[in-house]
Image (cartoon, helix red, strand yellow):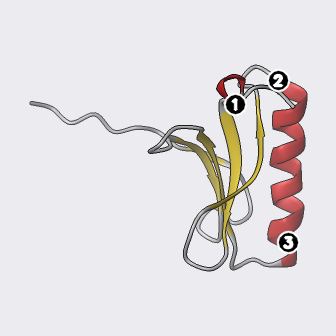
Amino acid sequence: MSARSDIEHQLQINNSGAWKTLAAWPRDDDDKRSNALNAARFLYYCDQRAKFRIATCETIPKVLRELNNTTRGLWRIRRTVRMRA
C-alpha cells in the first residue's frame, strides 16, 4: 500500500452514527475511485439506511460526493457554498 501521504481520497460509511473509512486511494487513481463508487452503490442496495461519502483524507475531511436516501442511491457531487463577507 502507498504511504499515507499519497492517499488523498477515501470512501466512508455511516451506518451507526459515525463515519468509518472503508477504503482509501491516491487522488488521481481513476480505476480505484470508480471501484469505490460502484462498491458503495452495491452496499447501499443491501442497506438503504446507510450513508456513503467520498472525502479527502484530512483531519476535517472535505466531502466531495455523497450517496444516501436523499440522493436515491445516486452519487451527488457536493458543492461548497462560499459565504460573502
| Label 1, residues with CA under 10 Å away: few <14, some 14-19, many ≥20 | few
Q: Do the residues labelled 1 and 3 touch (CB within 8 Å)?
A: no
Residue at the image position 89 percent from the left and 63 percent from the top = 42
Q: What's the mark number on residue 45?
A: 3
Which label was assigned to residue 33? none
- Compared with 30, 11 (above or below) is below
**Residue, disc 1:** 4
Residue 16, image x, y percentages? 62, 80
Picture layout, residue 55 above or below residue 52: above
Q: Which of the numbered marks, if any, corresponds to residue 29?
A: 2
Looking at the figure, which quarter contains the C terminus?
Answer: top left
Comparing marks 1 and 3, which lies closer to the viewer? 1
The CA distance from mark 2 to mark 1 is: 15 Å
- Please state the horizontal and vertical placement of residue 41, each as a whole percent of the image: 83, 59
Q: What residue type is labelled 1?
A: Arg
Where disc 1 sits, the SS reads helix
Q: Which amino acid does label 3 sit on?
A: Tyr
Question: First in sequence: mark 2 or mark 1?
Answer: 1
Q: Is mark 2 on a helix, strand or loop?
A: loop
Q: Which residue lies furthest to the front in this view?
A: 3
**Which quadrant does the N terminus fall into?**
top right
N-terminal-most mark, 1 or 3: 1
Residue 79 in the image: x percent, y percent?
Answer: 46, 39
